[in-house]
Amino acid sequence: MANMPEQEQTAANARDDKASSTQQKGRAAAATAPDFSGAFSSGGIVISVDAMGGDRGPAAVLDGVALAARGNPSLHFLVHGREAELVPLVKARKLKDRVTIRHAEDVVTMHDKPSAVMRSGKGTSMWSTIEAVRNKEAQVAVSCGNTGALMAVSMLRLRKMPGVDRPAIASFWPSKNPSGYNVMLDMGADVRADAVDLLTYALMGASYARNALGLTRPRVGLLNVGTEEHKGNAELKAAHELITDAAQNGDFTFVGFVEGNDLPGTRVDVIVTDGFTGNIALKTGEGTAKFAGELMREAFTSGIMAKLGAFLAMRALKKLKAKIDPRRANGGVFLGLNGTVVKSHGGADGTGVAAAIDLAARLGGLGFVDRLAARVALASAAGQDSAKHEAGDETKK
Amino acid sequence: MANMPEQEQTAANARDDKASSTQQKGRAAAATAPDFSGAFSSGGIVISVDAMGGDRGPAAVLDGVALAARGNPSLHFLVHGREAELVPLVKARKLKDRVTIRHAEDVVTMHDKPSAVMRSGKGTSMWSTIEAVRNKEAQVAVSCGNTGALMAVSMLRLRKMPGVDRPAIASFWPSKNPSGYNVMLDMGADVRADAVDLLTYALMGASYARNALGLTRPRVGLLNVGTEEHKGNAELKAAHELITDAAQNGDFTFVGFVEGNDLPGTRVDVIVTDGFTGNIALKTGEGTAKFAGELMREAFTSGIMAKLGAFLAMRALKKLKAKIDPRRANGGVFLGLNGTVVKSHGGADGTGVAAAIDLAARLGGLGFVDRLAARVALASAAGQDSAKHEAGDETKK
């Protein structure tokens, strides 16, 4: 908790007081006895992990669990999936003391439609994974499964946080900032976002950057086709005004509009956009980086001198590769629900899954979901106050 | 004309027949005598060049003119700007026989608002540059100036092509396809686009790819957040249907939805999107490529072995750099106006300006604007036929 800015703690405490009655209710509603109730109450962290649904199957997920467990002795895991498949995997990795298996017969595939999973997904490992967070048996959920279905099940079972109309997916974007990353949202939870949603994204993104990156006062930018205030559509101009107002009490700095080339830059820490644009930007960035890497590889195998050069520079190239390894920044976080869910890349291997679990552990340890809720509640209250104030002014006329 | 696909010729001829009366009118309206009327009628190409308004001033533009003039003896230039500045630049580059200077006192800066330039930009070099295309003194215009102002002046003076509601800016995107490039539009002419606009972009993009890249049957994709047909917003789903129908008679293949990572890939030749998304993707790609380049440079200067490696691989690295040199693909083309306008990057040097002029020369030599108009007219006619057909069906009921 050393990295936690003080104002964030205060906000979290404020929220904790208010939220205690609902939390008690939530705990009472947990039908099955928590496996790590001791761990949970003594400050240990329980992570609910969906072992199925990733491209590489449960073995890769359990590799990730083993890596994360080795790195952090205070972690415990609820692992959901087919028991017969999971028991030998857990045994082989000597994880019996750290893992409890929750049997779930069904698996959500990448081709399942979110609506179908919402209707008839109760028997799936994904559903069971989210249910453990809902029942307060685990602080955070991690899944490599189908993003649309995971968001749908999370919305259905965890419900939206008060004050949030559209939840968002936040991702890390490699950048030149000291932490090595910027935060960007929404990466595709919803293709639309109105001005109020974009304001909510700014608040949530700032809170996420404070907690996940340890920044005291994140700089937030709104993605547009130019930095001048007259650029963009009406929704963006309205959002610009709303975020400007909110920044005054929000412990973040609003730098205004930013452009696509600012995503890896040092002008901002948090980039706010709608889920359509965010998803296009994410995949364009990934595609460009991959293309650049392929051209690089071609160049270094194009002749004897080039090959020799690559051999000599191998250590530097390996360091570079590790620095931009997408597995290190694996984990899109769902923001705006009553519970934290980390979406790992579908194709993640053990290293990727471990990175997603580490992120989940960090957020769980900080009580992030309560802090985020407190931030959103404070902003909603301020918005209502100023709305009342304006209404008061109106009646005076 | 060797690269011109046959069907494109036929379409162009069809249009030429229909368009001849309006063209005569346009030619008669040319008030001043063309400087290269001989060149123009004998198949030579006259390019109207805005010498002012780029970040590097008129010297860089004239460097580009000199490079392009050396590479292509059939080119003549109408160069617009302050005569006192331009005369010595033309003289120093020994371009007197190839260039006619058109004096224009005013310059559009990067900060001028498009609306202001439309109202009072008559005395600017940008206005004069477009006017020469309007008056049929030149086949194509090239400018490094303010994009918004250039589009506004081009719309005002050249007018939209019949059947086009929103003109678009098309750019080359470095790709793994044999030509080395894909075509993408709209890159920011308009932040909005409805389903019919996206259809028009598909037709215009396909025509542009046929002419500029020499592809017989370009593959067109519609940019979305997933490739499944249920993804995206209502506008995209409607555009998907319209483009599917148009592809049957359009000499292009519609591959359906594509994603951000397909931009540099081999699945498509033409990527269609609205100007907001296109601009964000363009700048995200540029930013990512620049970031990757910087990390590369850091890696190769990080130690003695790395430096030695870089030295040995220098030839390969230089080849790579040349391959991805953004100056080589310089030139966004305005599509959907009664005249072709090439927008060079504002920061272009001589090499960049020359690339934009080469592209302009190619399009001018092919009579691209008439071909494009024929394509759009054919598609509109087909659309009206099928609308009539449907209406007929309706009345039968």
Image: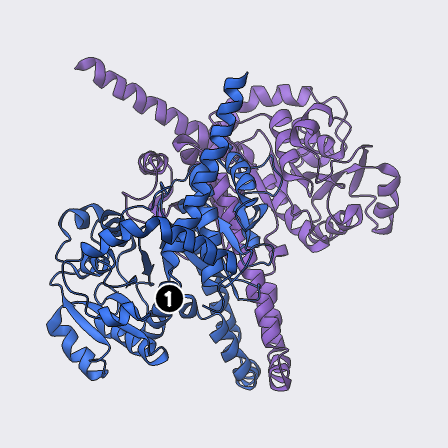
Chain colours: A purple, B blue
Q: Residue at x 40, y 46 (%)?
A: B275
Work out which quarter of the rendered image holds the N terminus of chain A and state it: top right
Q: Position of residue A88 (x, y in %)?
A: 88, 46
Residue picked out by circle 1: B365
Along the line of sight, the residue nearer the viewer: A125 or B288? B288
Sort mark 1 into few (<14), some (14-19) or many (20+) by Cα contacts within 10 Å: some
Q: Position of residue A319 (x, y in %)?
A: 59, 69
Along the line of sight, the residue nearer the viewer: A395 or B95? B95
Q: Is residue A181 left or right of residue A137?
A: left
Q: Position of residue A370 (x, y in %)?
A: 53, 32
Rendered view: B345 above or below B274:
below
Along the line of sight, the residue nearer the viewer: A274 or B346? B346
Q: Residue at x 13, y 63 (%)?
A: B104
Which chain's residue wears label 1?
B
Would you say residue B335 is visible in this rendering?
no
Which kind of residue does numbered mark 1 sit on?
Answer: Gly
